[in-house]
């Protein structure tokens, strides 16, 4: 906003406040005058009656003129857009100083030097501090001093008549006493300047603080306006206080239509804006805007707390993840195409290695066999990685199909664990399997659960140092099957815990300990367990080990009926 326009708006606002105040103090002055006339009529001695020289008709006329001028100012200030900055400055000067003429007339008819009506000047002097700078306030104080001093001196030198307030002898004696006049003028005029300077200092401090607040507010507005995410702030009373342009665009509404309104009173056609304030969006959730199926918004809810830990309000942050989703889809499609294209040649390579190792093309010397074995091993790893990538694609596309059957869970765990005993011996890691005899049958997809257990056991062995221990345990607990895989390995850092079940993620300590790996095992495992209506979580301490827990219902209610879902939420319990 232009600084001249801002200054004009400030002066208009202060003038309006002065106009409102004038209704009150003019009414007060008129009532005081009328009260003095009433007491005068009730007084037995006309000598003691106040304002005997101030005609009632003149009081009424002056009051009417003040009301009339105030009415002119009132209507003139109703349309500030038509007023220039110079125009409002002129209006401000007359709005302040015209009152001085009324005060002078009141003092003239109500006792001159002995009148206490000089107190009215203080109101305008103090108010001027909100119009002008320190110098301007001193100028207004000078105008008041000149007018008041000129009147008192004019009466002293008998240039104009002196009208006493109570018609008492001492009033005449004071009005024409040099010492009394000078003492009175010095005291009152000095008071004008002191009041003006004091008000000026306060106003300067207030304006400085106002400028700081304005700059801070403008900075905040600029930050909000330039945020790449949308933001809607609602105070503790449910009133919308702040909206940035990005939020308007993402949620398809106009800020002017909702600012200052309670969220409950917002028009129902603002579908997306109302939607984000529903109960389900109190945590991180995703929203598909109405009528825009290709867009996806992620909604974050942040409680705004002050220094005293009191709730100020709630901020809704709207992040557009449409492009991210599109890129993810493109990645998945690329992985799918690449995976299928790689699978055939890799299978052929595997078949060729098998034939060579069996000696179908001649006997191999030990060195040749060793090289071929290493190549075959790496080829197997590559095939496994391709299979993992294709599984991830199937999960994301909802094409990861399941076959639920009742199976002895204990035997399944033993079958999965058997090949890993050799790996544990090779890495000099103690491997222990402890299964509850009453584990019994569980309805599940055996192939998928084998993938989960194989991933957990393999990770536990690989990320455990020589001399460490891995323990697999299976038991019934609270009517559900609970499998735990505990190790004494490197653990999972706090920074990595929230992302541990996301695809392609590997913690920094895991990367340095074992560079090989694709970060897909836990992502696939979590999706499989979610589909089985179970839970997977972990506890961990860096350099002390990790324990993964897999909880499975004995007979999932929707086994084989519901569609696959892909939710990468972290069910970790630390």
Image (cartoon, grey):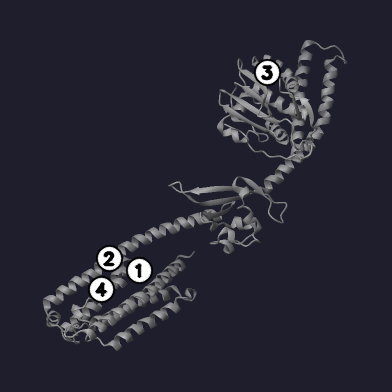
- Label 4 – label 3 distance at C-alpha: 97 Å
Between marks 2 and 4 in the image, the one whose residue lies nearer the viewer: 4
- Label 2 – label 4 distance at C-alpha: 16 Å
- Closer to the chain start, of discs 2 and 1, is 1
- The tag on residue 574 is none
- Label 1 – label 3 distance at C-alpha: 87 Å
- Residue that carries the numbered disc 3 in the rendered image: 433
* Location of the C terminus (image quadrant): top right
* Percent of width and height locating residue 492: 59, 28
- Label 3 – label 2 distance at C-alpha: 88 Å
* Percent of width and height locating residue 172: 14, 83
- Residue that carries the numbered disc 1 in the rendered image: 132
Residue depicted at 22% across the width and 76% down the height: 116
Residue depicted at 51% across the width and 54% down the height: 236
- Closer to the chain start, of discs 3 and 2, is 2
SS assignment at label 2: helix
Q: Are marks 1 and 3 in contact (CB under 8 Å)?
A: no
Image position of 572 (left or right of 39): right
Image position of 533 (left or right of 266): right
């Amino acid at each position: 906003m232009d600084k001249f326009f801002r200054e004009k708006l400030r002066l208009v606002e202060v003038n309006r406040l002065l106009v409102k105040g004038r209704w009150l103090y003019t009414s007060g002055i008129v009532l005081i005058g009328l009260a003095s006339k009433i007491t005068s009529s009730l007084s037995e001695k006309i000598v003691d009656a106040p304002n005997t020289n101030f005609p009632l008709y003149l009081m009424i006329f002056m009051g009417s003129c003040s009301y009339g001028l105030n009415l002119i100012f009132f209507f003139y200030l109703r349309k500030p857009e038509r007023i220039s900055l110079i125009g409002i400055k002129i209006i401000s000067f007359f709005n302040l100083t015209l009152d001085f003429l009324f005060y002078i007339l009141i003092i003239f008819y109500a006792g001159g030097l002995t009148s206490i009506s000089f107190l009215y000047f203080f109101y305008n002097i103090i108010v001027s501090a909100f119009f002008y700078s320190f110098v301007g306030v001193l100028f207004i104080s000078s105008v008041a001093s000149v007018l008041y001093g000129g009147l008192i001196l004019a009466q002293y030198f008998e240039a104009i008549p002196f009208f006493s307030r109570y018609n008492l002898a001492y009033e005449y004696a004071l009005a024409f006493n040099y010492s009394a006049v000078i003492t009175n003028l010095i005291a009152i005029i000095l008071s004008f300047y002191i009041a003006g300077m004091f008000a000026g200092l306060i106003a300067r401090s207030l304006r400085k603080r106002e400028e700081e607040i304005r700059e801070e507010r403008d900075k905040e507005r600029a930050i909000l306006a330039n945020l790449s995410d949308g933001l809607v702030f609602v105070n503790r009373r449910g009133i919308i206080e702040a909206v940035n342009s990005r939020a308007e665009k993402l949620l398809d509404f106009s800020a002017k239509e909702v600012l200052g309104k309670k969220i409950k009173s917002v028009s129902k056609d603002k579908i997306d804006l109302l939607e984000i304030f529903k109960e389900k969006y109190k945590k991180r959730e995703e929203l598909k805007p109405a009528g825009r199926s290709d867009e996806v918004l992620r909604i974050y809810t942040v409680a705004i707390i002050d220094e005293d830990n009191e709730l100020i309000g709630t901020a809704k942050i709207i992040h557009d993840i449409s492009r991210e989703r599109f890129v993810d889809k493109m990645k998945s499609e690329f992985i799918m195409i690449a995976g299928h294209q790689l699978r055939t040649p890799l299978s052929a390579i595997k078949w060729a290695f098998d034939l060579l190792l069996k000696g179908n093309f001649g006997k191999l010397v030990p060195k040749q066999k060793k090289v071929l074995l290493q190549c075959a091993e790496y080829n197997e790893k590559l095939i496994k990685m391709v299979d993992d990538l294709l599984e991830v694609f199937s999960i994301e596309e909802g094409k990861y199909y399941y076959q639920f059957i009742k199976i002895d869970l204990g035997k399944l765990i033993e079958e999965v664990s058997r090949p890993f005993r050799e790996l544990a011996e090779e890495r000099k890691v103690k491997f222990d399997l402890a299964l509850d005899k009453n584990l019994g049958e569980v309805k599940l997809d055996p192939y998928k659960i084998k993938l989960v257990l194989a991933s957990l056991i393999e990770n536990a062995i690989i990320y455990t140092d020589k001399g460490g221990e891995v323990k697999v345990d299976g038991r019934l607990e609270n009517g559900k099957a609970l499998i735990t895989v505990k190790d004494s390995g490197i653990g999972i850092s706090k920074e990595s815990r929230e992302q541990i079940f996301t695809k392609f993620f590997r913690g920094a300590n895991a990367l340095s300990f074992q560079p090989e790996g694709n970060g897909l095992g836990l992502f696939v495992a979590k999706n499989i367990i979610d589909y089985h209506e179970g839970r997977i979580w972990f506890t961990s301490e860096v350099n002390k080990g990790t324990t993964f827990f897999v909880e499975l219902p004995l007979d999932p209610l929707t086994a084989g009926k519901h569609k696959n879902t892909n939710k990468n939420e972290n069910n970790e319990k630390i």
